[in-house]
Amino acid sequence: MQLARVIGTLVATQKAPGLEGVKLLVVQPLDRQGQPVGEPAIAADGTAQAGPGELVFVIASREAALALPQWFVPVDLAITGIVDQVDVPPLEPDQG
Amino acid sequence: MYVGRVGGTVVATIKDPVFAGHKLLLVDRLALDGQPTGKYDIAVDIVQAGIGDLVLVLDEGNSARQLLGREPLGAIRAVIVGIVDEVEVEGKA
């Protein structure tokens, strides 16, 4: 799972079977320090409680479908939690 | 599986039920020479790892669900399954 920031919402009326009632959000993936990395993506909201501005963690690929009430629906990215707190000190250059 | 170093902690109240009662740690993925690759995972810890520990990370859904007793369901992939004492590659520790 990776950190992401919810930056928007997406509405689709015509959807594949299984996606009815699934909330879709635009998320910006973040690096370990919370800085944006890569391109924004669309994620299904497995918590049903996330909204724009929130820090979340997302799960990708096959496991994304297991985050939703109805599983094995066509999604490849899902929000699995809303982050309260992240405590990650910066990487030291000589660490590792 | 890959070798990583625990970089920090992540706390979430609202989360998938599969994570209830489990500690979430942010793990920086390392190359075999021990240098960070820039990639990371938020992983469930089942071996009482702490910040700074060198760990073995499983990143596969079916195994993760088996470990947490959640088969066949559970939106989970990354699990810390070991604390690494030593890695030796072609004679170099």
Image (cartoon, rainbow, N blue to C red):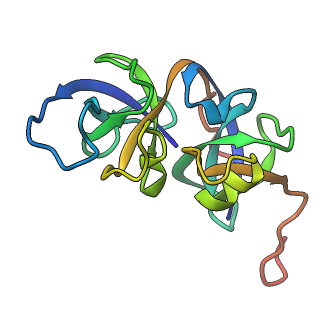
Q: Is residue A92 above or below residue A49?
A: below
A25, B73: nearer the viewer: B73
Whether residue B3 is visible:
no
Is B55 on the left-hand or right-hand side of B10? right
- Say which residue appears at 84% left-offset and 82% top-offset: B91
Picture quadrant where residue A42 is located: top left
Is A42 on the left-hand or right-hand side of A5? left
A17, B22: nearer the viewer: A17
Q: Residue furthest left?
A: A14
Residue B57: give x, y in percent of width and height.
Answer: 70, 55
Q: Residue furthest right?
A: B85
Residue A74: give x, y in percent of width and height.
Answer: 30, 53
Q: Is residue A13 above or below residue B77?
A: above
Q: Is residue A39 above or below residue A35?
A: below
B18, B53: nearer the viewer: B18
Whether residue A6 is visible:
yes
Q: Is residue A16 above or below residue A78?
A: below
Is B81 on the left-hand or right-hand side of B58? right
